[in-house]
Image (cartoon, helix red, strand yellow):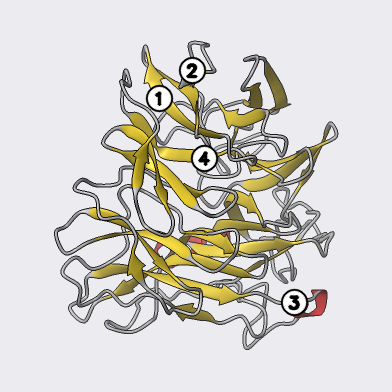
Amino acid sequence: MKQITFAPRHHQLTNTRTWTADSRWLAFDVRPSGASFTGETIERVNVESGDVEVIYRATHGAHVGVVTVHPADDRYVFIRGPQFPDADWQYDFHHRQGVIAAQGQVRNLDAMDITEPFTPGALRGGSHVHVFSPDGQFVSFTYNDHVLHTLDPKRDLRNVGVAAPFGPVTPAGHHPREYAGTHWSVLVSRTTPEPTPGSDEINRAYEEGWVGNDRLAFIGDTLSVGGEKVPELFIVDLPQDEQGWKRAGNAPLEGTSASLPAPPAGVAQRRLTFTHDARFPGLLNAPRHWVRSNPQASAIAFLLRDDKGVVQIWLIAPDGSQLRQLTHNESDIQSAFNWHPAGHSLGFVLDNRIARCDATSGTVTYLTSDHGNPPSGDAVVWSPDGRYLAWMEEVDGFRQLWVTETGQ
């Protein structure tokens, strides 16, 4: 294993798609550890030479972070906070946007419209953790709503959305914080403030992952019969053409002053896991992880405790069949994880070491030892050629980037 960044500052990897398509560069931001969102640059480091390049530098008081990379092109998508922030409009979950940097230009991904009449294809709040679909055509994100946050913060429920390449979308611009976007953006999940206990209703959708190019899986918070939160796995089938993305269902795509934007017609979420009666119910929020499908879109991986209370990787088919426990470790998996680009193994942190497991047998192989500090659980990411795994590890008080060869 080798350390590839050395500057006395934090280097933050996103949980997936941090490598350029040629497997030579890792993209990162420079936020401090924790919840602070004060980074001013998006950068990349060459894993062979250690050379660092600035991709984008924020201006006008904005901050940036959580960068991911297009699977084929030299394009980067990331969060940008408000430019010219003031007392009424500062960085927050519902005050941020996605932007794409490519060929020296930066464009807004999602449009913003917060004054009625709202604009179909525009959002009314903040998008974040943007990830390209495997074919690079679409971008998933999680979302919080400014309009409902202003009305009642308890009604600003986190949801999952998709930016589709059917823009541009240009709101009328009745508010100085409104702007146009290159993509047509909609929510694809449905939430309700007070789910019926024991039902499939959820009040939060998050930690999504692409299942091929036309489905999206995510974690949704259900309530048990006793009213306890139980995170379960859900999936949605996405529209197949531009008309499908722009066709409203039984509620407006753009939402109303009292309701969230609604998914397009035919987009219905299905629940895949039913763990309410398990000894340890619910998908894990700690370690924080994002559900991930293999490249073949035949198996979705997630973290769940086994009957001994140990955090393991489990797999399920997109139709809800073939649920099985993949790993049978004696100790908890400690991190988010990702699939090898060929789909035959997964990488993660186990026993404070970088490890991979066979996707069929669950056999674990350790790839590193003798870490100075435990690897961060935020991100363990394969290079597109499968040769490397990258992660973060603290050195002298700063998060640095590391890689190890995988032997695959």
Q: Residues within 10 Å of mark 4 (few under 14, many from 20)?
A: many
Q: Quick check: marks 3 and 4 in contact, CB under 8 Å? A: no
Residue marked by disc 4: 381
Label 4: element kind: strand
Residue marked by disc 3: 240
The quadrant holding residue 394 is: top left
Residue marked by disc 2: 3
Q: Is residue 13 above or below residue 398?
A: below
* Amino acid under disc 4: Val
Residue marked by disc 1: 393
Q: Which tag is nearer the camera, tag 2 or tag 3?
A: 2
First reached walking from the N terminus: tag 2 or tag 1: 2
Q: Residues within 10 Å of mark 3 (few under 14, many from 20)?
A: few
Q: Residues within 10 Å of mark 1 (few under 14, many from 20)?
A: many
* Amino acid under disc 3: Gln
Report, in whole angstroms, how far the alpha carbon at label 2 lies from the one at label 4. 15 Å
113 relative position to 193: left or right? right
First reached walking from the N terminus: tag 2 or tag 3: 2
Residue 145, label in figure = none
Percent x, y of residue 398: 42, 18
* Amino acid under disc 2: Gln
* Amino acid under disc 1: Glu
Q: Residues within 10 Å of mark 2 (few under 14, many from 20)?
A: some
Q: Quick check: marks 2 and 1 in contact, CB under 8 Å? A: yes
Q: Quick check: marks 2 and 4 in contact, CB under 8 Å? A: no
| Residue 104 visible, this angle | yes
